[in-house]
Amino acid sequence: MKDIYILGIESSCDETSVSIIKNGCEDIATVISSQIDIHKEYGGVVPEIASRCHVENITFVLEECLEKAHMTMEEIDAIAVTYGPGLIGSLLIGLEAAKTLAYLYQKPLIPIHHIAGHIYANSLVKPLEFPLIALIVSGGHTELVEMKGHFEFQKLGGTLDDAIGECYDKVARVLDLPYPGGPKLDQMALLGKNTYPLPVPLKEDRYNFSFSGLKSAVINLAHKKAQQKEPLRKEDLATSFQKVAVESIVSKTKKALLDKNIQHLIVAGGVAANQGLRKEITAMAEEIGVDVSFPPMKYCTDNAAMIAAAGYYAYNLGIRAYYDLNSESSTSLC
Amino acid sequence: MRILYLDTSSSFLYAGIVEDHKLLASCKKNLFHELSKEALPEIIQLFEQTHLAPRQIDKIIVVDGPGSFTGIRVGITIAKVYAWSLHIPITTISALEAMMISSKSKGNHVPMLDARREYVFAAIYDEENRQILSPQHIKLRDLLQKLEEKTYVAITNDSIELPISKESYDPDILKIVETYQEKEEIPVHAVNPNYLKKTEAEEKKG
């Protein structure tokens, strides 16, 4: 069978990324230009600055990726692009670039949902086995999705308020950790003890998550300690917070796996890099005899390799977009 | 020599293909909020009308601003990816310069765009079309002060209240392209929007 090379483009937030993936699994070249150092100064991603950076970076990143792959556009079979969800101004740059290239080289244009990309990051390690449950944990999402086959998504539950990554970043701010605080909070949690009692969110609700109550509890606790001039043991608070947050995710995921009698779990999204979550998910999966897959660290955060990997399966299924494809800031996977 | 002109700095798409002093095809269309969706399909129409392939273009002239930030980025992204991938020379033109070139009246001109909060994007040109004030983000009041000595015609499609006479903007794509076709090409990676204004976050930060 002929090898299929998909060029993926991702620009939904603050990373401009282009990747070439062979047959949905082999990373030929991936280039990621991160704007993290720029946005750090503002304590978070500034959408207009992100859009400005993407337009400055896009041709550099495309060029570097093709050079790294020793390939030309003519050798590419199709172009996959993130059309949403994300920052609208950022998405547009990748989208216009992808549409233009698809037209100039008469290649199929494949629209990829950002979350589908995160799920398919796992296929860069081993092929997805169905049926599976995907746990998506990132700065913008916390979702449980059931998949019976390629691109057959069925949402089981999601967050009712804040996404887990968002909650981590906000709690990290309370602990004076610089942006992006989520990963640093994960590190800090290794150092403390679980001493602060915090509310366990949405114990009863089936597969839905809620993190705003937990976040508020941490903020209130820190505030109270400051008012009473009592010292706040930051490491302990980090550990206590992480324990409750991770437990909530793990218990809902376990429930979904057992209820649906599913043997395969994949974890996706930026928070899949969280060590505390990895450890607890792995232990839970072992306990109930479920096979679990985490994407390698480099594919956890936003990247175009996952978009190109998803693009391969979408390509095989005949999923195509026309040149009037538009970006969508909020769009659901299923 | 075949030239593709592209301006997406407002909600209008202005595009055209010029060959040897002749406008082969053009598009002047208000795409409202659908610019990002429809700009490329409209450009493709120009190629279909002229039976030309994208590779048969010898130069691209793209408007780099000022205007709608998102709009400018749509045009710049299409143009620079196009120029980069097919190795086509590219150059930029200010939206205000394009407005001045297209003017049908004689005299001193002030092309301007509403930049909100009492500001405009504007430039000043004398009757010889020489630039007196370079394109900038300026308070309308300050701009008007600079106009006191002579008679000026404002060129704008925006509803800006002005004490001077106004001319609406209808791009003369052939004239714009002919004026700019010899302009030096710009290295493609350096073709970027010229917003003339920092982001609010940068302004607040100082």
Image: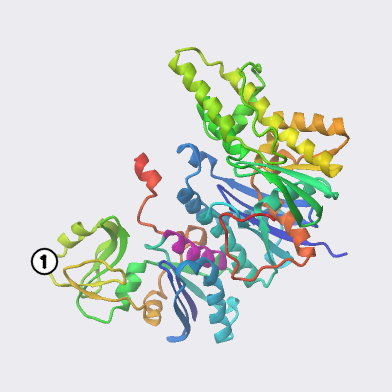
Q: Amino acid at mark 1?
A: Glu
Relative to A162, residue B183 above or below = below
- Residue A86 position (above or below residue B185): above
Residue A279 to residue B75: above or below: above
Image coordinates of residue B204 in percent, x first then y, are: 35, 42
- B124 vs A2, left or right, is left
Q: Is residue A305 visible?
A: no
| Chain bearing mark 1 | B
Please give the name of the residue rendered at 66% of the width and 68% of the height, measured from the top-left corner.
A321
Q: Look at the image and tell me whether residue B154 can be seen.
A: yes
Q: Nearer the viewer, residue A199 or A120?
A: A199
Residue A322 as seen in the image, left or right of residue A178:
right
Assign a secondary structure to mark 1: loop
Instruction: Find the residue positioned furthest to the front.
Output: A204
The residue singled out by tag 1 in the image is B149
Residue A321 sits above or below residue A175 on the image: below
What's the magenta region? B69-82
- Residue at image position (67%, 52%) is A304
Question: Can you give x and y, in whole percent of width and height, for residue B99 in the image?
Answer: 32, 73
Q: Is residue B76 magenta?
A: yes
Dominant secondary structure of the magenta stretch? helix
Magenta run includes residue B201: no
User: In which quadrant of the rendered view does residue A139 lie?
Assistant: top right
Image point (40%, 67%), residue name: B10
Residue A136: x, y in percent? Answer: 70, 43
Assess disc 1: are there few (<14), some (14-19) or many (≥20) residues with their C-alpha within 10 Å of its C-alpha: few
User: Residue A137's quadrant in the figure?
Assistant: top right
Q: Quadrant of the C terminus of chain B?
A: top left
Q: A309 left or right of B39?
A: right
Report how many numbered discs are placed on residues in the image.
1
In this rendered view, identify the residue nearer to me: A239 or B66.
A239
Q: Position of residue B158 (x, y in %)?
A: 31, 69
